[in-house]
Amino acid sequence: MSDYRVLYMVGPGRSGSTVIGEILGQSQHVANGGELLLWWMARQSSPARRCGCGERLDTCEFWTKVSQVHPALSSPDPAVVAGLYRFRRFSTWPGLWWKSRNGQVAAPQVTELMVQLYDAIALVSGSSVIVDSSKSPGYRLLLFGSNLQVQTLQLQRDPRSVVNSWRHEKRDPTSPGDSLFAIHPLRSTVEWIAQTLATRWFIAPRLRPHGFTVETYEDFVQHPRRHTESLLAFAGLDERESLFHDDTHIHLEPTHNLAGNPGRRGATERQISLHERWPDELPTSLYLFVTVACAPWLSRYRYRFSRRSSS
Ligand SMILES: [Zn+2]
């Protein structure tokens, strides 16, 4: 058993995992790694990508130290890294689930590489909790083959909001390599459904009640202080001092997070609140399509069907 815990976020992209990871990372016991599955790709990216601390990834002191902990981290076997990225495809998830359910480790070398990265982050940061917002169910399934203590957070966001967000590029003028591309609405809808189904069918039943929790982004930002405290407790931390000034305001220091949402570097005072743009921005045809396609889950996560709130 590891002497640290991983808080692994699983769910669709553009669900608010970047800001939640940054908030949790304000705890002195937490290392917010961001989307760790992208670590190997991000380090070789051209143009160079930036760490959440503002440094280039290849010059950030934290990640340089991490890469020096184990030879596999600075010069991994390319075949293993290629295998790692294969498990982002949802066609691989049923097979991973089936093997892990039967006690087999589907890809031992890939799992080993992930564990080496977590071990190195724990060693360099001295933190007892590592936040990984990779979000892919495939990587969570791979971790069933490890001895790590993993707490899994299913992060959901209204699919209309997710699809609307993916329609827009997020450019990062200071670091073009960190810009987020737009995704076609059909693809982002299918991914939302696939991620949700895989999490509910393949992951949650094996972890409930203590190793798994569900959080919607909308609930989190309505009461950020309270939800932050409960997430830290879920990760096994007894954080006695609130990270917030009041119910919604927080001072965010930069964390060494990978990828995620660009444009959030540097210390800042933030008010955490909900800004729903999809009711004004999503074309009616798309609103109807996504609402119908995701209807079975809207009521489960207490999302309204209508475009406008009745209150
Ligand atoms: Zn950094």
Image (tube, rainbow, N blue to C red):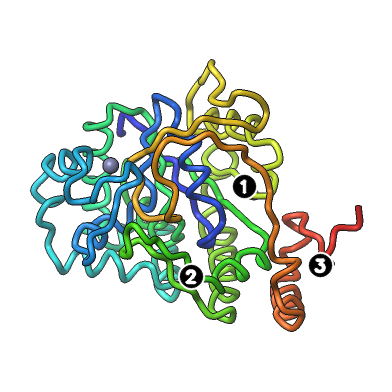
Q: Which of marks 1 and 2 is nearer the N terminus?
A: 2
The answer to which of 194 and 284 lies nearer the viewer is 284
* Residue 186: image location, x then y, percent: 58, 81
Q: Residues within 10 Å of mark 3 (few under 14, many from 20)?
A: some
Identify the secondary structure beneath mark 1. Answer: strand
Query: Where, quadrant-wise, is the N terminus in this rendering?
Result: top left
Name which residue type carries label 3: Arg
306 relative to 123 in the view: left or right: right
Name which residue type carries label 2: Glu
List the residue tagged with mark 2.
169
Q: How far apart are marks 1 and 2 (CA)?
A: 28 Å
List the residue tagged with mark 1.
214
* Residue 124: image location, x then y, percent: 22, 32
Image-quarter location of ligand 1: top left
List the residue tagged with mark 3.
307
The answer to which of 274 and 109 lies nearer the viewer is 274
Identify the secondary structure beneath mark 3. Answer: loop
Q: Pointer 1 and pointer 2: residues touching (CB < 8 Å)? A: no
The answer to which of 120 and 21 lies nearer the viewer is 21
